[in-house]
Amino acid sequence: MKIISSFKQGLTLTRRTKRMIFFAWFVNVLLAMAIALPAMKQLDGYLSGTVMDEKILERMDPAWAGAFRADMEKSEFIRSLDWTIYEYAPFLNHLEAQMSGAFIKTLANFIYSFFVRWELNLGPASLLFFLSLLYVCVNTFLAGGFIGIYAKDYPSSFTEFLMDGAKYFGKFFRLALIALILYYLFYAFIVDWINGSISLWTQNEASEVIPYRYYMIRNFVVLFLISLLAMIFDYARIRMVIDDRTSSFGASLAGAGFAMSNFLSTYGLYLLLIVVGVALMVLYALFESIIPQNSYWPLVVLFLVQQLYMLFRFWLKATFYAGQTRLYQEVTTQKHAMSVSTAQSTT
């Protein structure tokens, strides 16, 4: 079966690129520290000499966290934080923001204002915005490196990984801009229409259960379509590397064509990898729940477990690229062999 075969080949390839995966983890740790260190410094100054010092160490207090954010309202770092980020799956607490595409819309509006109106619209969280943009650029570079080495038939060196990342950065960044446009149109027209329609459809319902069910269906549909778009652009990157394409728009169409014409294999592999990711999250949640968080050394252990969890997430992302690359190569090789066989039989 192509799905299992590609998944196994992806795991084999990632075992050969351990240094690259560690490098990707390390770079993202550095980016996280750009936000974490200033926030921790402000937190330390706020707590120092207060009675809440020991209490917060034992357990996070939501009321205190709200007061801390209110007192630090001028800080872009603190204003953007929510005490729920200390949980193992913070996106579950901010699902509504994700469903409305808040970051996508902010990024799209900034780019539109800059390139069309020639206005530098920084907004209220300019520093965090630029850090997020830097995160996108870094991961675009890493995607080029990973797909570049997984597309080769021989083991690659770390130097080749960096060279491939630089080689495909411009192409992948143009793809990211096309993806941003599609995501923006999806949220601005489809998701916003769904949200407005749900309010109209359920405004006369006596029970809150009915709107809740509608929003759960919306979440399922939106997450499915977002995963479909993400998968399509993964294959667009793969086709840009393997087929040596230069047009980002053409690669996007080619990626969509391959993903949809082989939907059972492509989305089956994608879904399998997502299931592995959810399993990793559940496993981490179990470890996080049994580690006490009321003294120094357990917190150190928890920090190490968190970093191990993040490392496995990067390993899984590399497996996405490796498995999808092998699936594309396998399908195209089979199609080429069939076309050659057909041509020979007709001559």
Image (cartoon, grey):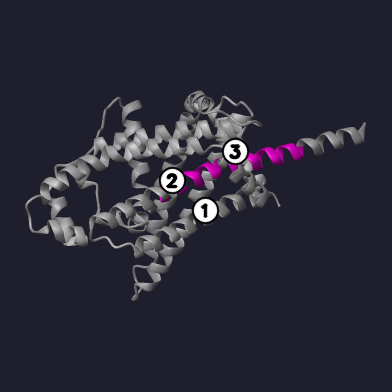
Residue behind mark 2: 311
Residue behind mark 3: 255
At mark 3, the secondary structure is helix
Measure the alpha-carbon separation of dots 1 and 2.
Answer: 16 Å
Is 345 placed left or right of 182 in the picture? right
Task: Tell me which amino acid carries mark 1.
Answer: Ile
Q: Nearer the viewer, mark 3 or mark 2?
A: 2
Q: Which of marks 3 and 1 is nearer the N terminus?
A: 3
Residue in the picture at 23% in, 61% down: 294
Measure the alpha-carbon separation of dots 3 and 2.
Answer: 28 Å
Looking at the image, the residue that sits furthest to the front is 297
Q: Which of marks 3 and 2 is nearer the N terminus?
A: 3
Question: Is-magenta flag for residue 291?
Answer: no
Residue 100 seen anywhere in this rendered image of the structure? no
At mark 2, the secondary structure is helix
Name above or below for residue 243 compared with residue 91: above
Is 92 placed left or right of 166 in the picture? left
Report the front residue among 258 and 44: 44
Q: Magenta part mainly helix, strand or loop?
A: helix
Mark 3 crowd level (few <14, some 14–19, many ≥20, 10 Å Cα)? many
Task: Tell me which amino acid carries mark 3.
Answer: Gly
Q: Magenta part of the protein: which range? A: 309-335
Q: Toward which corner of the image does residue 122 lie, by quadrant?
A: top left
At mark 1, the secondary structure is helix
Residue in the picture at 36% in, 54% down: 91
Q: Nearer the viewer, mark 3 or mark 1?
A: 1
* Disc sitting over residue 274 in the figure: 1
Give coordinates of residue 166: x percent, y percent.
48, 24
